[in-house]
Image: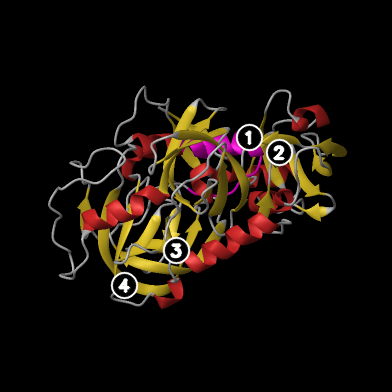
Amino acid sequence: MSEVDRPGGYWLPQVAPPPRRHPLRLVVVLLVAATLSAVALGVGRAAWQAAFTFPLVSSLRTPLAGLPPWGPSTVSPPASPSGGSADPSALVAKVAPGLVDINTQLGYQNGEGAGTGIVLTPSGEVLTNNHVINGATSITVTDIGNGQTYAATVVGYDRNHDVAVLKMQGASGLQTASIGDSNAVAVGDEIAAIGNAGGVGGTPSIAAGTVSALDQAITVSDDTTGSSEQLDGLIQVAADVEPGDSGGPLVNTAGQVVGVNTAGAAGSRVESTTSEGMAIPINDAIAISKQIDSGPGSANVHIGLTGILGIMVREPHSGVRSWYGSTVPGVLVAGVTPGSPGEQSGLAAGDVIMSLDGATVDSPTTLTSLLTTHHPGDLVRVAWADQSGQQQNAAVRLAAGPPA
């Protein structure tokens, strides 16, 4: 196992994908996904990963292994962890038909990933986390209601709020999830996180617990670069949420979806006073999904295919700064994909990108934000300093790539 220089200075192990699915599959492949995203997009942000980096308060994890695929059984349910009337197996039976397992191929690194999605429409619109599909070159989803697998495309995503909307190709007559009201959620409410824990597929597992706080925030940062980004307004839960649950529903005792399970980034540090799981309020997630459906895009929301430069970037270290001059802003080109727009423009490893379309590029995150509003085929002007210190610029036509 070797370490890869992640854009933005994030260091993550690069691991060959396992030959078959197993409970630890998701943890391994999402580390590969972080590297893929950098290669494909040429932007250095803290790629969201479906794995918590802060400890979770364990409540009840019920794998419900006795249930047959795609349906409930008569297995006796365990007792509710909080002594209430919540029935975990009944919740799974009610909620599961409105969910999908999401599997992604990460073509640039021959990796794969997995997560969960919530079915919003009978024609196959799916709500999930952006980090579940980040860097994916192909996506398939298996509808738990009918057991069929469909190819899926990305309708749009909001990387700053970790929300994405997918469309299942050729789907119809699907059972949808029952959407609740996250404004009605209160501290102490019994809840359950349901999803594709461990990325193993089949009947969803359930983590039952309680709401411990509302309107919470987590900041994901990298100690190497000092860059950070924040998710706020989150529902804090005392429930044993696991990798693979990301994008899946947080439900109340009536089986209504009140949140979307999410987490901090693997390989990054979560600055938070809490040690519990988090979920995006469903009212917020649905509002973003409607914005994606209606278009157009915005500074946060990207609609349709992603435009890429095809380079890897990172924050320049102090030696590079002194070589180019301490006043030179920008991000260091750490690698260029052969045949990419970046290579065709003349960009090379060791160059420092200073601006995009006249806007200063002072961090990998800034470059990502500037590219969010663009699409394949768009012409952008990139200015950079080469390794000799000479300033260069070129008009670059973006290629199609995986979601950021």
Question: Of helix, strand and loop, which one carries label 4?
Answer: strand
Q: Is residue 39 magenta?
A: yes
Q: What residue does disc 2 label?
A: 308
Please, what is the three-letter code of the amino acid marked with disc 2? Ile
Question: Of helix, strand and loop, which one carries label 2?
Answer: strand
Please, what is the three-letter code of the amino acid marked with disc 4? Ser
Q: What residue does disc 4 label?
A: 212
First along the sequence among labels 3 and 2? 3
| Residue 23 image point, x, y percent | 29, 36
Q: Nearer the viewer, residue 249 or 333?
A: 249
**Image quadrant occupied by the N terminus:** top left
Residue depicted at x 36% and y 39%: 199
First along the sequence among labels 1 and 4? 1
**Image quadrant occupied by the C terminus:** top right
**250 lies left or right of 86:** right
Mark 1 and mark 4: span between their CA atoms? 39 Å
Q: Nearer the viewer, residue 178 or 240?
A: 178
Please, what is the three-letter code of the amino acid marked with disc 3? Ile
Q: Main secondary structure of the magenta part?
A: helix
Mark 3 and mark 2: span between their CA atoms? 35 Å
Residue depicted at x 67% and y 27%: 337
Q: Which mark is residue 40?
A: 1
